[in-house]
Amino acid sequence: MANGDSGQAAAAVKAVPAKALQELDAEIAAAGGELLEPAEYAGSIGRTLFDTPASDDGTITVLLPAERVKEVTHQSLVRIKSGIKSTDPRSYLGVVVSGPFAEPFALRADSPMLKTVAVQGVPMLPKYHGRVQVEILGEEIDGGVVPPRRRPLPNSPVFLLSGEDTARVLRLEGEVRIGLADSHEDVEVRVPTQKSVWPRHVGYLGTTGGGKSTTVSGEIAQLQAAKFAIILLDTEGEYTAINEPSTDKRMLDALKRRGFQPKGIANTHVYHLVGRETRNPAHPNRHQFSLQFSELSPYAVMEILELNDAQQERFWKAYDITKLALERLKVFPATKEEGQKLLELDELETGYPRMTLSHLHDVIYYITALIGGEDEPYLGSKEFSGSGRDVLKQLVEQNKAQLPKNVFSWRTVLGRVGRVKRLKIFDIAGGTLNYAEMLQPGRVSIVDLSDTDSPQINNMVIAQLLRGLQQQQEANYAEAAQKNQAPTPAMLFIEEAHEFLSAQRIAQMPVLFQQVARIARRGRKRWLGLAFITQLPQHLPDEVLGLINNWVLHKISDAHVVARLRKSIGGIDDGLWNRLPALAPGQAVVSFTSMGRALQTAVDPTPCRLLLVD
């Protein structure tokens, strides 16, 4: 272009006349001046959007300017001031359940132009805004929060709550700290140790490596400090060293980041069956114990031994003859007072007092020899030697006509009872569990079952513990009530709960499950709670899930399991369920009855040492 042409083009662009600008300023002033944000909107991070046909009840879309997007995170709590210019303003509380998402102005996010510049590496960033989806928690009225009766109006200002306000609204106060709310560095997830929360029952679910042991051991440490009595059924022995501070480098680094120090749990005691080892033989407080046959319901024993109907009939015949023999020999009842107790005996809950497994085995052995036409066998119990043998012989002869004749079924029952007897874990002198000691404030009792290698034995241990702890806590509660005091709260943690309470086992062992259900129903009123820990939640039946009030859900990858849990567990929104399969180790969805809503939580590292399972 020639120089003359350039000059003509430059001359064609003229300045705006000053008069025109003055007239424009005058019109703006006449209209009220420049458009300013109302004072009620000051400090807001965004505005509510109009609803669309795709809008859902209970949620609302909020748009944010680009410079405020970084301030909002998943699970952020917000306050929406609706209708601030109307005669009926309302204030709502909500939580961000999805987003924030970034959306460009004027263009679709997947437009060809934006795709092209992204692929070609051109540094072009169009103007954009943020979008979040907010679930309405409730409406603020007179300082409280009630279920929302309406939806916030469009273009209502949205304000971000502080960490302190978030903790208050979600009721995260309490003595037991679980961790930090994900995406929040200043919001601690805490639950109180009051009766309405912890003596209620807790479920710790998640796949292997998700962090269940870390969560459980950390909470045990805090409950112990709060003077709870803790009993832990440890099937792998990994908790038997929690009296020592953690030595794991990753755990130490995590503790340092959170401002905590490694520390062992005081007043821990390890229990193991006689003749079996503990995984931590160096523990300073070790106790051997034996099972007491008289503390086990005969119905539960038959279920655990998996006897069929014919075998159960033979078991009962032998059991009744054993009772008669012990009564005639004055083993029990030996006094009138004991005779009165016999009238109150409930065999669905307990066995016959002072009956040992050896007593029952001798009677079954004697009957089997008689039915099979064999010589009288050697009997091992001292009560059935000498004159006691004559009493047994007389009773068997008197009941011979009512005894089933098929010797093969008798031998099957004898074999199953004998197999348990040969383990030498029953009725050992001095091996009884002291439930009164186990339920002392601040005591942590770890029952190490890592060396049993038998689900049957584990189930017998659990059955005895359940009964013994329940009876002792009933007595503690009655004593405390007389003094107008609260009893010592207690929690029983059951590791690998699916092995004990699977749907198949419940079908086979209804009496044993009824003992669990009885504790679940009555125990909470007596300050005795149950905690079920499992890596295979798919094996827990609906009956067990229905007993649980509080949940700590670590990573669960199986979509079918997640779908089933969604039907059984209320109060967890869809966004959290969708995140469950992708949780990292140490993350969990936490839902306690004290909390305003479930939260994705970064669980605190445990300060104590765990013996990790290979």
Image (tube, rainbow, N blue to C red):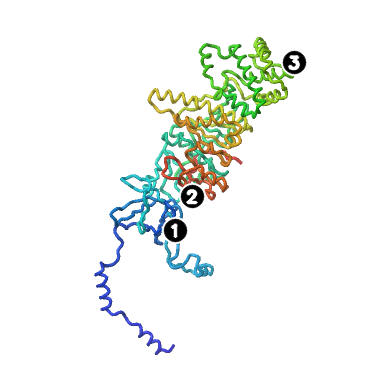
Residue nearest the observer in this picture, 456 or 61: 61
* Nearest to N terminus: mark 3 or mark 2: 3
| Amino acid tagged 2 | Asp
Which SS class for mark 2? helix
Disc assigned to residue 187:
none
Q: Which residue shows up at 65% across the image and 9% down it? A: 387
Query: From what the image shows, is residue 501 above or below residue 254?
Result: above
550 on left or right of 315: left
Q: Position of residue 590 (x, y in %)?
A: 47, 44
Q: Are marks 2 and 1 in contact (CB under 8 Å)?
A: no
Q: Does 426 appear above or below 185?
A: above
3 and 1 marks in contact (CB < 8 Å): no
User: What element does badge 3 sit on?
Assistant: loop
**Which of the two marks, 3 or 2, is nearer to us in this view?**
2
| Residue 303, horizontal then vertical, whole percent | 61, 29
- Residue identified by numbered label 1: 53
* Among numbered discs 2 and 1, the one appearing first in the sequence: 1
Pick the quarter of the image with the N terminus.
bottom left
Badge 1 amino acid: Pro
Front-lying residue, 346 or 599: 346
Q: Quadrant of the C terminus?
A: top right
- Residue at image mark 3: 375
Few, some or many residues within 10 Å of mark 1 (<14, 14–19, 20+):
few
- Report x, y in % for residue 172: 41, 43
Left of 408 or right of it: where is 351?
left
Mark 3 and mark 1: Cα distance apart in space: 88 Å
Mark 2 neighbour density, 10 Å: few (under 14) some (14–19) many (20 or more) = few
| Label 2 – label 1 distance at C-alpha | 20 Å
Read off the residue under disc 2.
574
SS label for mark 1? loop
